[in-house]
Image: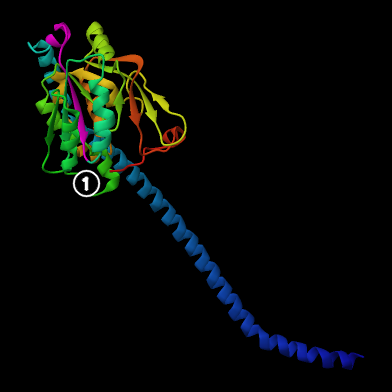
Amino acid sequence: MAARRRRWNYPRRALDWAVRPYLRDLQARLDAAQGSIEMLHGDLGRVHRELEEVNGRAGQIEVEARRAAGIARHIYDEEPANRRRLHALRAGDDYEPAYSEPEPLVTFLIPTYTSFETLRDVALPSILAQTYSNLEVIVVGDCAPPQTEQAIASIGDPRVSYYNRTVRGPYSDDPDRRWYAIGGPPVNEGLARARGRWIATLGDDDAVRPTHTEHLLAAAREHRWEHCYGLQLVHFAAGEPLTLGEFPPRLGQWGTQAAIYHAGLRFFEAELSDAIYEEPSDWSKCRRMLRAGVRFGMLDEIVVDKNETRRRSAEEWLAGPIPRAD
């Protein structure tokens, strides 16, 4: 039995001797791999620390960039100059007649492009049929087609005048930015031509209520507000309309179509550069008025019906940002 065991053990020992070099080599490889893994962990640790430092620097740069943007916006908005202009307006001879004249002239501005049918059938009739009649309406085409002038001529009311710009915009080629500045240059042209003591603005597919001007003007004059606005009823392609309006004004709850303001504030113009800041030009104007100290007031009454074309329903309006369109 002992001899038999020796015969079986001999090949096993020989196998051990033969395998041992490979095992040593494998162990060496495992040790080397372990060392590489440890080095990799060390490298990853350094990378994580460097990333944290980069994130910290990026956060600091973002804070500094926001501060720089705020300074640039302050300069762009001309806040100190606007306050001086407002104070000069209040001290000037042209300020008081807006409140003291029995029936001051009110100028409506309508910027338009290709919506000449709704301009003729909706916007203009609503203005001209109001209970307050001492009005002038200045329609300014944003390089509009000939049909616009024909549509206005068909109204046949001497209170309506028309001027067509020879160049549209110019607006950004980026449709996401273009929306913010659309209609601004025609409004500015209309401001330069306005003769009224008070200014109102209307979209070419919107309609003012019959007492829009009478009630807003009465409230502004009674309380000596320089900017008076009411509620707007927004109509969508589907679903129920939505009533918007809050005091004090804020973006999404104020609309230039629902407002009148003292004509002396015409130095607050629409700016094409509002598109850089991704801010609607009408709200930019309102915000600059607020920051300058213009006296605002609100009438808790629906004064305008707004036709919304960028949202199909009130649910879409309330769900998120306003889609941008030309």
Q: Does the segment drawn in magenta span residue 183? A: no
Tell me where the magenta segment starts and ends, as one range: 97-113
Q: Quadrant of the C terminus?
A: top left
Left or right of 296 on screen, residue 271 = left
Residue that numbered label 1 is attached to: 172
Q: Quadrant of the N terminus?
A: bottom right
Please provide percent x and percent y for residue 274. Answer: 22, 37
- Foreground residue among 260 and 102: 102
At mark 1, the secondary structure is: loop
Please tell me in which quadrant of the rendered image residue 79 appears. top left
Please tell me in which quadrant of the rendered image residue 152 appears. top left
Q: Residue at x 27, y 31 (%)?
A: 121
Which residue is the extreme one toward the right?
A: 1
Please provide percent x and percent y for residue 39. Answer: 48, 64
**Camera sees residue 20:** yes
Please provide percent x and percent y for residue 29. Answer: 56, 76
Label 1 CA crowd tier, 10 Å (few <14, some 14–19, many 20+): some
Left or right of 127 on screen, residue 34 = right
Counting every numbered tag in the picture gives: 1
Q: Residue at x 55, y 68 (%)?
A: 34
Which residue is the extreme one toward the left?
A: 93
Left or right of 44 on screen, residue 114 = left
**Camera sees residue 283:** no
Residue type for callout 1: Ser
In the depicted structure, whether residue 176 falls above or below residue 215: below
Please tell me in which quadrant of the rendered image residue 107 appears. top left
In the depicted structure, whether residue 83 falls above or below residue 235: above
Q: Does the segment drawn in magenta span residue 101? A: yes
Please provide percent x and percent y for residue 103. Answer: 17, 9
Q: Residue at x 36, y 34 (%)?
A: 308
